[in-house]
Image: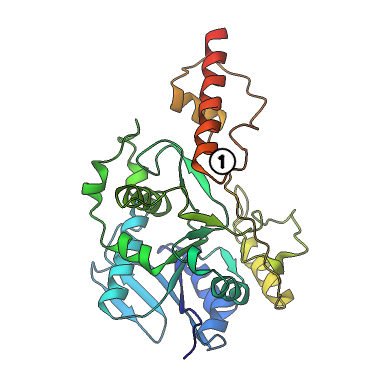
Amino acid sequence: MSDRKKILVLAMYCNQPLFLKQEQFLRDVSYAKDIIDGKYDNVDFYSYTASKDDKYHYNKSLHRIYVPCDDGLEGTFEKTKKTLLMLNSLGVEYDYIFRTNCSTFVNVSLLEKFINGIPEDKSKVIYGSSVYSSDGCGPELYDFYVPGNSMLIPRFWCDVISNADLEYYKKFDRTPYREKKAYYCIDDNTIGFICNIYAEQHNICKYDIWGNYNGTPHINGNTIVSDFMNYIVVPVRIYGGDRELEFYIHRAIKEMFVESEYVKFDDRKVFNILTEHNVYNLFDFGKPALTIKDYTVIRSFVDHKEKYDNSCQKFISKYLQQKQEI
């Protein structure tokens, strides 16, 4: 009996012209076509979005799922949770969900190699192309989560997420941002929020449930990543430009693609949330402009809770001191 893991790639999209075109492109041209055509024995693909008739629909032949929910950004957690519930009700078997979007190229062969190489003691780690730290993704400030274009979620955590009563979890939010709706409705944030609280309540170190493999930076017309075939995900979303160019970039990546045996992997956690803008919100510095030249403390790499807490405390002390000097 094979011990290879069953992987289900879930690509979220919404019912707007650009995203509908992206979704069709994945299945006609890109990596999803290979999955649907049966290239990978233990990997399946489904796209999922909001239904237009407020009902559930599961189209096995087209590999599409529709669920009743808000189709905007603030409906993404509901969209993901209802999709997981629908998969459970249909008895779809999987060991891992890889949640991504339609503007990201997924290197399926490397994803499969990576998953099948995860040791047993890491089998409940949620992986992403980065591990972010946020002021609202857990019961405390600075808790971790992974970005929505590259969430590798073990079945254990999929069950936690799909069964979560969000109103119950909100009771354990100890951050000052409980009025921020985004943390309760945008799926990567909300998944981080739920999993961190669940871990805390079940004597699991919440800092150890997150891990990352290296993903490339966002690709645009001015960026060339020569070794992109060594990355599990290559985001091709263009910010502030002509998004139609994404299709040409995506097609070029697919046409140049050859399978690689090497996975770029980096099991470190990156702080990237505390920008100047967020500092104002987080510490209530108000309107006076602060000149912040050194982000090295909060952007340090950490692996353990003690180092993480120390880094945060140093950061807070540093900026409180700056505030007094104004």
Could you tell whether 324 is left or right of 88 in the image?
right
Q: Nearer the viewer, residue 172 or 235?
A: 172
Q: Nearer the viewer, residue 97 or 74?
A: 97
Residue 76 location, quadrant: bottom left
- Location of residue 203 in the rendering, given as x and y in whole percent from the top left corner: 34, 50
* Residue beneath the point at 57% across and 20% down: 318
* Residue beneath the point at 53% across and 20% down: 317
- Location of residue 310 in the rendering, given as x and y in whole percent from the top left corner: 53, 31
Residue at the limit of the structure toward the bottom, as seen here: 1
283 versus 92 height, above or below: above
Could you tell whether 51 is left or right of 219 in the image?
left
Q: Which residue is mark 1?
A: 271
* Residue beneath the point at 48% across and 78% down: 5
Number of labels in the image equals 1
Q: Nearer the viewer, residue 102 or 171?
A: 171
- Location of residue 195 in the rendering, given as x and y in whole percent from the top left corner: 36, 53
Q: Nearer the viewer, residue 18 or 63?
A: 63
* Element carrying mark 1: loop
> Label 1 amino acid?
Phe
325 versus 122 height, above or below: above
